[in-house]
Image (cartoon, grey):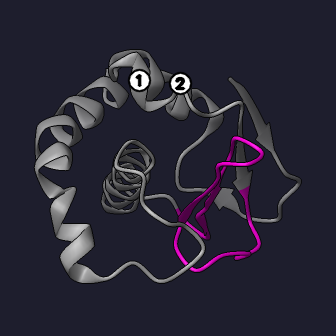
Amino acid sequence: MKIIVYNHSKQYALSRSQVESIKAILPKEYFAPINEFHLLEVDRSVEIFEYSEANRIAYFSYAVDQKTPEIVSHAIKELLIGLARIKGKSKFFHKIKKIEKDDYLYFVSIWHPKCVSELCK
């Protein structure tokens, strides 16, 4: 998977190396559908994580002024929800309903602590 980082004036909630670390610990099927992972500053979508199945491109738009542990934690949660949505064949580029988001929280509850731990090494 190719990770593309766009020029930016802010920093991203997750860096390229952090995305690579998370990818390394998750089961392969979660990143398998993605050919390109774009880190964006400009909000081009409805949700933080969007996915184009036709192009096999994931868009992660989460630029921040200051990176804090809370922001990184939230970014990991959003990344995990997005990956679970791909696997669950969710429709992208529309606002996700709370009930649908809740469907993915079990996956998040399992992997979020592992991802946070991996990034704290």
Q: Residue 98 carries which label?
A: none
Q: Which amino acid does label 1 sit on?
A: Glu
As helix, strand or loop, the secondary structure at mark 2 comes to: loop
Q: In which quarter of the image is the C terminus?
A: top left
Rendering coords of residue 47 (x, y %)? 52, 73
Q: Which amino acid does label 2 sit on?
A: Ala
Q: Real-space Cα distance between discs 2 and 1?
A: 5 Å
Judge left or right: residue 92 versus residue 40: left
Per the image, is 29 magenta? no
Over which residues does the magenta segment extend? 40-66
Query: Would you identify the image quadrant in which residue 20 lies?
Result: top right
Rendering coords of residue 41 (x, y %)? 74, 66
Which of the pair 12/97 is nearer the observer?
A: 97
Q: Are marks 2 and 1 in contact (CB under 8 Å)?
A: yes
Judge left or right: residue 38 versus residue 87: right
Rendering coords of residue 68 (x, y %)? 40, 58
Rendering coords of residue 3 (x, y %)? 73, 33
Q: Which residue is drawn at 39% across and 53% down?
A: 85
Which of the pair 76/13 is nearer the observer?
A: 76
**Figure check: 37 above or below 7:** above
What residue did someone put label 2 on? 32
Q: Residue 29 carries which label?
A: 1
